[in-house]
Amino acid sequence: MGEPVSAVGVFCGSSGGRRPAYAEAAVALADQLVARDLTLVYGGARVGTMGVLADRVLAGGGRVVGVIPGHLAEHEVAHQGLSELHLVDTMHERKALMAERAGAFVALPGGWGTLDEFAEIVTWSLLGLHHKPIGLLDVEGYFEHLLAWLDHAVAEGFVRPPHRALVRTGTDPARLLDDLGA
C-alpha cells in the first residue's frame, strides 16, 4: 500500500435511511476510527448518517474534518462542531479536497451523492490520480446489487479485473479498515 493511513474519507448519506442498521454501522465505523486514532474526513453535514458518524467520532475524542459546498452550508446542514470545517464552492472541489486529505476511503449506504463520490474516487484511482485503498461497508446487503453490477461489468468486458479489485468490501468495519491498511 503506500504511506500509512492517518485519515479516512467516508462517503455516506445526508439521510438516515430506513433501517437502524445504517446508523449502527456509522457508529461502529466511528468507534473504529477513534480506536485507531484516524481522522474522519467527510462531507461536513450534521444530518443523516453523516451527522451520526461525525458526532460519534467527536464524542469519542476523535478528529473530524468536514468539507461542504457553501450552498449546502447556507441551508443549515453544515456541522458547526467539527475539528475543521472547509467551505468550498462546488461538489467537485469537495471531492478533490476530501481526496487530498484522506489516505483511504470507505462508502457507507447512501444515495446519489454517495454513489457519485464513491464512483469518482474509484475512477481517479484507476486513472492513476491516487493510489489509496477504497472500500464499501456493506450493511445488511445494501451494496449487493452494486457489487453484482461490478461483477457483471467485468464479465461483459467493461471493467478490467484489476480495476474491479480496487473496491474492497466488508461487513465489519474493523476488518474492512484492516483490509484498507488503516
Image: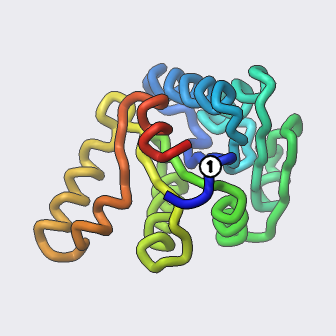
Q: How is the image coloured?
A: rainbow
Tell me if 70 is positioned left or right of 24 in this view.
right
Give the image location of residue 40, x and y in percent.
69, 42
At 30% from the left and 59% from the top, the residue drawn is 165
The quarter of the displayed image where residue 36 is located: top right
Q: Look at the numbered disc 1 and give the secondary structure of its residue.
A: loop
Asked if residue 54 is positioned above or below residue 35 in the image, the reply reads below
Which residue lies at the image location 80% right of the left edge and 25% below the top edge? 61
Q: Is residue 31 left or right of residue 88?
A: left
Residue 136 sits in which quadrant? top left
The answer to whether residue 119 is above or below residue 61 is below
Q: Quadrant of the C terminus?
A: top right
User: Mark 1 is on which residue type?
Assistant: Val
Q: Please state if 166 lies on the left or on the right of 3 as rendered.
A: left
Residue receiving disc 1: 5
* Residue shown at the point (41%, 28%) measured from the top left: 172
